[in-house]
Amino acid sequence: IFCQVGFALIFLAPLSSSFTNNNTSTKMGLTQIMTAPASGSFSMAPPLTVVRKSADAWKSASDVTLHRQQMRKAIFVLVQQKGQSAKLQIRKIKALEACLFASADSLGQYIDRTSLRLRVRKATEQLQEQAQSKPTASDIATERRRVTLQVLKLLQARFAKKGLSTPVIGKPALLQMSQQLEVSLFRKSQSLEEYRNTETLRHRLLDLLNGALAQRC
């Protein structure tokens, strides 16, 4: 028993003396603990997992809606024009605010009023470039009529007998078929360039016809 007490005093003596020292010499900061070399059983401790938030996590915060409303008011002060309809101004302000919101990396950058005028100018230029590059509804309608006529010509050449000007299938039926095929081409195309590409039109039509025949079989 005395031997055990003696060993206990030997091991506890350094610990008690270390606690009596001042705090600056005995306490290790969090940085020192994290960077200390592993030794003994400490090396078997599991690694710490650092949970990082997404860069766009601020966009889903509870107060973002209020900030966006305030930002629209600030943009209105900058871009308001006399004689312009209120509906058009609201649409323009919403588009500019959405562009600023999408391009911002943080809430502080988004609500920064010192650079707001410059950011609004860049967003306006970006929206103008997108409007110029994006085809209008009339352009798309024109392309669809042109593609429908091309499909009709291909069908007429396909179903016409050699030496005869009258096709086996009447023109109204071919026109209806060409319109249905054009709708399928329009839905499957990934872009307007792909849709109106005349070089691949015959191949895409064959794919559609083969797919329709496979479904019937």
Image (cartoon, rainbow, N blue to C red):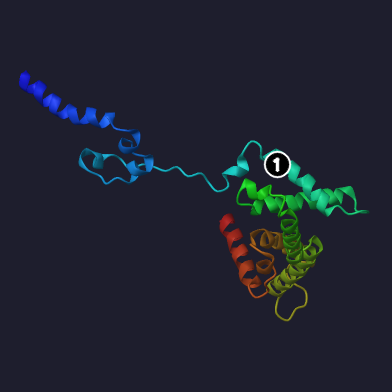
* Nearer to us in this view, 43 or 170: 43
Foreground of the two, 19 or 83: 19
Query: At 42% from the left edge and 43% from the top edge, which residue is drawn?
Result: 50
Picture quadrant of residue 154: bottom right
Q: Secondary structure at mark 1?
A: helix
**Residue type for callout 1:** His
In this view, which residue lies farthest toward the bottom?
Answer: 163
Would residue 16 appear left or right of 52 to someone viewing this image? left
Assign the C terminus to one quadrant of the image: bottom right
Q: Which residue carries the number 1 mark?
A: 67
Q: Residue 51 falls in which quadrant of the image?
A: top left
Nearer-the-camera pick, 159 or 42: 42
89 in relation to 193, above or below: above
Q: Is 96 or 213 nearer to us in this picture?
A: 96
> How many numbered discs?
1
- Residue visible at 90% across and 53% down? 84
Image point 72% across, 69% down: which residue?
151
Location of residue 194 in the rendering, given as x and y in whole percent from the top left corner: 65, 68
Image location (x, y in percent) of residue 43: 24, 42
State which quarter of the image contains the N terminus: top left
Q: Is residue 52 left or right of residue 163?
A: left
- Where residue 209 appears, as percent x and y from the top left, is 62, 63
- Check the image and report above or below for 211 versus 51: below
In percent of width and height, residue 171 lies at 79, 67
Q: Residues within 10 Å of mark 1 (few under 14, many from 20)?
A: some
